[in-house]
Every structure is written in structure tokens, then in C-alpha cells.
Amino acid sequence: MASSSDIVDIDTENHDPDLTPKVIANKLNLGSKFEEWLTKQNGDPLLVLDFVGGVCLDLDNRALIRNALVANGAEETDFGNIFKFHDSTQLRNAKRGVKYAVPWAFYNSSPMVEGYQGPNREWIAYTRTPTILSAFVTSFSDKTGVLTQLYFDEFTGWFGKLSFYVTIFAYFYSTKTLWFRSINLDKKPVPEPIGVIAAAIYLIFLFTFIPLPFYDLINQRAIFTGEDGSTNIECDNSSFLNLLSFLAGLVSICTAVLLGFADDILDLRWRHKLLFPTLSSMPLLLVYLLSKNSTAVLLPHFLQKYLGGASFLDIGPFYYIFMVSLVIFCTNAINIIAGINGVEVGQSLVINAVIRSVDSIQLWHHVLSLCFILPFIGTSTALFIINKYPAKAFVGDTYCYWAGMTIAVSALTGRFSKTLLLFLLPQIINFIFSCPQLFHFIPCPRHRLPRLNENGKLEMSMVDFQPYKLSKIGNLCFRILGMARLIYYKEYIKDGESWVSMNNLTILNLLLKFNGPQFEWELTNKFIILQILCSIFAFFCRFCLARIFYDEVN
């Protein structure tokens, strides 16, 4: 968020004399008319909204900024995105007004400024490098020679880096407090669960982060209005609602970490793993309800004609059911694809990197999501170095539930819960493929991870059952999977009865079926590559293919 000082002294000797009005006009893509107009200015404070070099804002968001500026005394010019002010005080008030109306506009990856000396020895300054993360390029001067400039802190940039180094440091000083386990042939003990330490570091960073994006609430003033002795309080609620969403997300993540730690110790049953995420989602759902956020979904063209031409459909309470289902699925999706070195952290890193990219492209909608994602990427990168083959530590179920809940929280707070499903294609495929076992149509052992053979390679894990004991649905699933060649099975006789040995229904076993026995690092790399390819396909669907079915794609 924008913070720091509003007034900064400028040393004129440090500025590039070649930064003429023409150069600035070219940098801002505003043409020769702006160059001529800028040369004639007498030093009144100016503010230029960079709708070209920075984020490509849609018309609604441009209108929000324009209205906030005009309401605080800005004078519009013929250029549309350039505003004049009578003095620096009016400019500062206008910037504060915009900051309350559109807080996402104050993220900028380059806080440095350049400027040039105008005809009256005033300085006009602007951000040096407009990027996809910058919604503003400010350009203004002051007759007194003192520059009024917004500073953009880079807290979110080094947030992830610091969490990375702290996680590495904590690992080396905490392994003695963990218990040990080994699945390798050499039986070398490995500490577990290191995910508890990473989750603790992540939560500490988020708790520390709370005051920074919501610092402006301290200076927010309420306006008292009313008639006939009644009193109404009018204030900007958007920051409060964002704070509530942030805290609700924190509560959900904390409960997911608690669930994972309990599973590491107690080996919880699946019904508990469904119940706890449901309870964890309650804070998010209540804040979503109190914020009066939309429960409507956009309809593609081919459905609109069947629903009276409406472009959207309000599904009401079913939207909340969808949100709960998403939380439950995400919380367990990472945990289902687990058990080999690096696969849990690797898939989580890919998914969160994709979410990070979407957050950057649509920053004005996804600021809160970015706050959850950046420190997670930092801690997970450190964990991946520790957990990749050969693992120096195991992450445990704590990491799986924490990662899944963080993904769900970032999607719900960023309002892209439906888009998230595209980024979870391997997890969805794994869930559908696993359904016959998860719903016990086919016997399901507690652990279905690939097994280690005598050659040190991973091969498919198997489950044994008697076919005649399967239900009708179980027999149907078994036959369909067999005809589709998605399973390997063999029949044998035991104690005079017919038995079947079939591979467990997980995507990791499916990869082993088609590729044969693999070393652990080979299987992990293959799955991460699959996750990346699915993410690329999801990006194509979200930003290219969607244009075929929808009128507008942001």
C-alpha cells in the first residue's frame, strides 16, 4: 500500500537534464499535444493517470479513480487522464481520497522517481518504470520547488524472500525437536513434520503484515449526519471489509494447520477431514455474506438464450455451498497426491505461482489474494529445497492442509473461485479417478502411495479384493476402468477363491502404469511437468478461449 512521506526534498543536480517534456510525453504515450501543453504549465500540481503504460484499466475502474479525484477538487483537462490542482495540499487530499476508493492502485514495483526541470525551475516527477504492477504514474510539480510524491513500499516484494530465508534458518535449528521416519531402503531417519515450522513462520509473517495494508484505518474519519435528533455514521467501509476478509482467511488457515498437525499425530479418519474444513470455511462465508458480495455467475452465450437473454444467474445459497465444497476439496486435494519426495510442495508451488501471475494481471481485484500468496511461495520454495529428493525432511500432513487452505482462501478473497478450478486440473482428475475407492465402491487402503521395489524404484501399489463381494456400482467401475486400460490388474486363486490384485486409483499410480517403475525424483518431476502443462492450458482457457463464450474477459 502507499505509505511513507508525502513531501520529499529534491536535489536538482541529481536529475537528468535530457528528461524534457518531449521525453516524458513519449514515456507516457501521450503525444505531442501533451508535450506542448506540459511546456506551458506554470507549476501547478499535476497528476497523470497512466492508463497506457501501466495496468490496462477497464472503464469502470477508470471512472472510480476519476470520480474520487474530482470529488476532492481535481480539475479535469482535455487529455482525460490528466488532472490539475490549485496547490499541493489539495493534491494530497485527492490522493488520500483515491487511496480509500481504490486501494489497489497503490501497488508499484518501482518506487524510484525521475523528473525534469520546467521553465519556472519546478520539477515534474513520475515513476521510473511503469509495469504491470503499477496503476499510477504521478507527474506533478510545486511552485515552491518541493516535490509532493507518493512512495510505494515494496513490502510485498521482499515479503516472500524473507520468509524463504527464515524457513531455511528455522529448519537447521529445529530438527532436534521433530520425530523421525524413513521409507527409503537405507532406513536413514528423516525429520517430520517440517511443515509445522514453515506454517508457523508463514502465520507469524501474516500477523506482522496486518497493520501495513490497513494502516489508513487509523486516520479514517467518520461523518456524523442525521435529522430529528437521529445520528448516522457515514464512513468508507471497504477497508474494514478487506480487513475482515483478511482476518477470516487467517482464521481458516490457522484451523487448517491445526487439522494437519492433528492428522500427523492422530491419523484422523476421512469424515473428520471433511468436517473440520467445513467449519474452517465459516469465517470466510460469513464475511462474504456480511459484505453483500455477489452470488451470481456469468453465463456463456449458448446458455443465455435459454434463460431469457440474461447474462448472469444468481444462484443464491448454492454459491455458498460451492464455496464450502471448494474449501473442502482444496484442503484435501494436495494431501491425496502425496507421499513421495517433493510432490506435495512442488504441486503447491506451481499452483501458487499461477495464482500469483493472475493476481499480477488483475491486481486491482486480487490485492488480498496476493498478501496470502507471496509469503507462502517464499516458505514453500525453502521447503522444496529441503523436501526434494533425497529429502532432508518430510513436510507431513500439516503442509498439505495448510497449502490447500491457502489456495482456497486466496481464490475466495480474490473472487476467482471458479477460475481456480482450471488451475487444479490434475487434482480434479486425481479426485475423479480416485472416486471408486474414496466412496468405497472398491476397497481402499489407508495409504495408496507408490511402493518401493528392491531396485530402489517406485512401482504401483496394489489392493487385493474378491470381485464377487463388490457392489453393482463397484463392479461397473472396475469394468469401465479395465476397458479404458486405466488400471493394471491380475487374477489369482487364494484358498480356493478367486481374487483380484489391482493398482490403487491415484494419478501417481496412473503415471507409473504408463511409464513403468520410476525413480522417486523422476516421478516427482513428471507430475510437476504435468501440473505446469495443465496450468498453461488453464491460462489459455481463462484468457483466450473464454472470449468465445463471454462478452468480456478481464
Image (cartoon, helix red, strand yellow):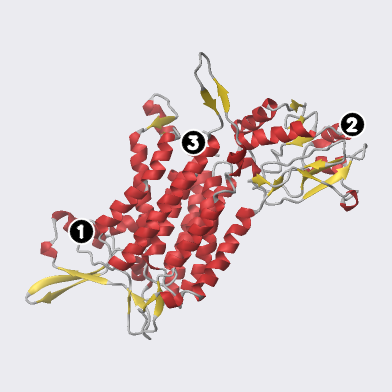
x 82%, y 40%: residue: 25
- The image shows residue 383 at horizontal and vertical percentages of 49, 68
**Which kind of residue does numbered mark 1 sit on?**
His
Left of 444 or right of it: where is 277?
right
Q: Which residue is mark 1?
A: 440
The tag earlier along the polypeptide, 2 or 1, is 2
SS state under label 2: loop
Q: Residue furthest left?
A: 496
Q: How far is the residue under mark 3 from the one under mark 2?
A: 46 Å
- The image shows residue 69 at horizontal and vertical percentages of 69, 30
Q: Which residue is mark 2?
A: 40
Where is 248 relative to 462, above or below? above
- The image shows residue 76 at horizontal and vertical percentages of 75, 26
Front residue of this view, candidates 205 and 456: 205
Q: How far is the residue under mark 2 from the one under mark 1?
A: 78 Å
Residue 219: assigned label = none
The tag earlier along the polypeptide, 3 or 2, is 2
SS state under label 3: loop
SS state under label 1: loop
Q: Which residue is mark 3?
A: 550
Question: Is there a contact, CB below 8 Å, between mark 2 and mark 1?
Answer: no
Q: How far is the residue under mark 3 from the one under mark 1?
A: 40 Å
Front residue of this view, candidates 143 and 508: 143
Can residue 346 be seen at all in this image of the molecule? no
**Which kind of residue does numbered mark 2 sit on?**
Lys
Question: Is there a contact, CB below 8 Å, between mark 3 and mark 1?
Answer: no
